[in-house]
Amino acid sequence: MDAQRAQEIADSVDMANVIHNGKSIYIEHVDQQNGVATIHNLDEPNSKQSVSVTELTEQ
């Protein structure tokens, strides 16, 4: 995924199905300049991590 699409998903009111390492995640924030997204697994909302947007896949 690219940073622009990640930002569109983060800004959307609709929940997109995004996968990171085989798990469904929620995108909290996108740093478009650095291509990094702050995410959390849907089943672990308090466990945030920063990952490259290239590691995210939209289903």
Image (cartoon, helix red, strand yellow):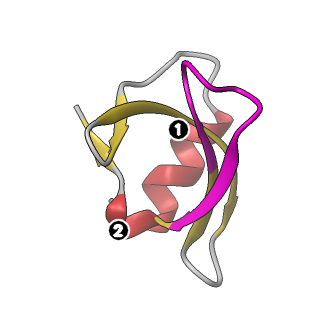
Instruction: Kindly identify the amino acid type of the residue bearing the numbered disc 1.
Output: Ile
- Image quadrant in which you'd find residue 14: top right
- Image quadrant in which you'd find residue 45: top right
- Looking at the rendering, the stretch of residues picked out in magenta corresponds to 39-51
Name the residue at 54% across, 76% down. Answer: 35
The local secondary structure at tag 1 comes to helix
Mark 1 neighbour density, 10 Å: few (under 14) some (14–19) many (20 or more): many
Mark 2 neighbour density, 10 Å: few (under 14) some (14–19) many (20 or more): some
- Of residue 43 and residue 33, the one placed in the foreground of this image is 43
The local secondary structure at tag 2 comes to helix
Q: Position of residue 3 (x, y in %)?
A: 49, 66
Q: Is residue 56 left or right of residue 47?
A: left
Instruction: Kindly identify the amino acid type of the residue bearing the numbered disc 2.
Output: Thr
- Of residue 6 and residue 51, the one placed in the foreground of this image is 51
Is residue 24 covered in magenta? Answer: no
- Of residue 38 and residue 13, the one placed in the foreground of this image is 38
According to the picture, the residue beneath numbered tag 2 turns out to be: 54
Q: Label 1 to label 2, Cα distance in Å?
A: 14 Å
The N terminus sits in image quarter: bottom left
Is residue 42 covered in magenta? Answer: yes
- Image quadrant in which you'd find residue 31: bottom right
Which residue is outermost to the bottom? 34
Whether residue 30 is situated above or below residue 33 in the rendered picture: above
Q: What's the mark number on residue 9?
A: 1
Name the residue at 36% across, 53% down. Answer: 56
Name the residue at 59% across, 70% down. Answer: 36
The C terminus sits in image quarter: top left
Q: Position of residue 23 (x, y in %)?
A: 35, 33
Q: Is residue 35 left or right of residue 1?
A: right
Q: Position of residue 38 (x, y in %)?
A: 67, 54
